[in-house]
Image (cartoon, grey):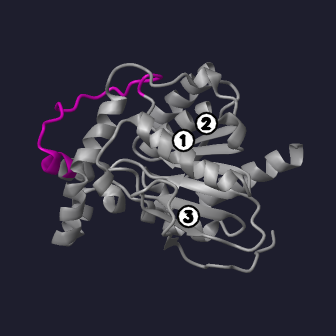
Amino acid sequence: MTSPSTKSARLHFITNSPVKGLAVAERRVANPRACVICVHGALDRGGSFVRLVRRLETFDVVVYDRRGYQGSRDLRPVDLDHHVEDLRALVAREVEHLPVILFGHSFGGVVTFAAALREPSSIGLVVNFESPLPWILRRAHSRPPLSDDTRSEAERFFRRVVSDKAWDRLSEPQRESRRQDGPALLRDLATIQRGHSPFDLAKLRVPATYAYGDGDSASYYRALAVELLEVNPSIETLEIEHASHGAHLKNSDQLAAIVHQRWDQLCASA
C-alpha cells in the first residue's frame, strides 16, 4: 500500500461547517481513496478518533462532536433523527467529491446505520464497533433506572464504561467537561432504552461490517453477531483480538485495517 503525501497531517476544525454550530474537524490527504466520517459514541467526542485518523493514511477523514457534546454543546441534546440529519449533511458535503465510508463507535454506530438506511446511494461502506442494538438482543443485566441528575449519571457512566481509575486520573476541568455532557448522554441512552427498534436493519443494503472485541462482553457480542446475521445475512461480523469497548483508542491499528481491507474488497469487486 502506498502512503500519499499529506496535505494536512493533523485534524483541524473547519470554519464552514455544513451545520451551523456543529464542531467539525478534518484531515485531508493527497489523492484520497474515499472519505471516512467517524461518529463518536455516548459521552465521547470527535477528538477521540485521533489515533484512528493517523492510521487511515490513504483516506480523507472527518470527525465531529455530535449535538450536545463538547464543541457542539450549544446545539443542545437531540433525538436520533437530528443526529442522522447532521450526519447526512456531512455526507452530502463529501460525496460530491469522494465515496463516503462511515465509521461508528458505540452509539455512533446507531447513527451510521440509520443514516445508511436513509441515504444508501451516498454511502459506500459502514463499519461499526460494538454499537448497542438491544432491540435485536437485550443484554442480561439490570442497572438502576436513570435519574434526572445528568452530572451524576455522566460520572457513573464513565466509571462503568471506562473505569474508576480512568475517572480518578482526570483533572477536575476534564471531569466537569464530562459532567456537562450529561444531558446529551441521557438522550442517547433514552434512544436505545425505549424498547422498540428505531430502524429495521433487514432493509440495509449498504455493505456493512459489525466488529466487536474479545473482552469482558465478548459472549454477549458473539450472541448478538449470530442474531444480527439472522436479521441481515449481508452484514459481516468480526471479532477483534485483545480489544475492549475502547478499541478506537487502544486498537486503532486493527480498526483501520478493517476499513482498509473492506474498502479494498469492495473496490476489487466493483
Query: What type is the residue that disc 3 sits on?
Result: Leu
Numbered badge on residue 116: 2
Q: Amino acid at mark 2?
A: Ala
Q: Main secondary structure of the magenta part?
A: loop
Label 1 neighbour load within 10 Å: few <14, some 14-19, many 20+: many
In which quadrant is the C terminus drawn? top right
Whether the residues at callouts 1 and 2 have beta carbons within 8 Å, the answer is yes
Residue drawn at (44%, 42%) of the image: 83
Q: Position of residue 146 (x, y in %)?
A: 18, 34
- Which badge, 3 or 1, comes first in the chain's sequence? 3
Does residue 50 show up magenta in the picture? no
- The reply to whether the magenta stretch includes residue 145 is yes
Which comes sooner in the sequence, label 3 or label 2? 3
**Residue 112 circle label:** 1
| Residue 155 vertical position relative to residue 84 in the rendered view, above or below | below
Image depth: mark 3 or mark 2 in front: 2
Front disc: 3 or 1: 1
Magenta-highlighted residues: 134-154
Q: Position of residue 247 (x, y in %)?
A: 48, 56
Inter-mark Cα distance, 3 to 1? 17 Å
Assign a secondary structure to mark 1. helix
Q: Are marks 3 and 1 in contact (CB under 8 Å)?
A: no
Q: Amino acid at mark 1?
A: Thr
Q: Is residue 85 visible?
A: yes
> Residue tagged by mark 3?
52
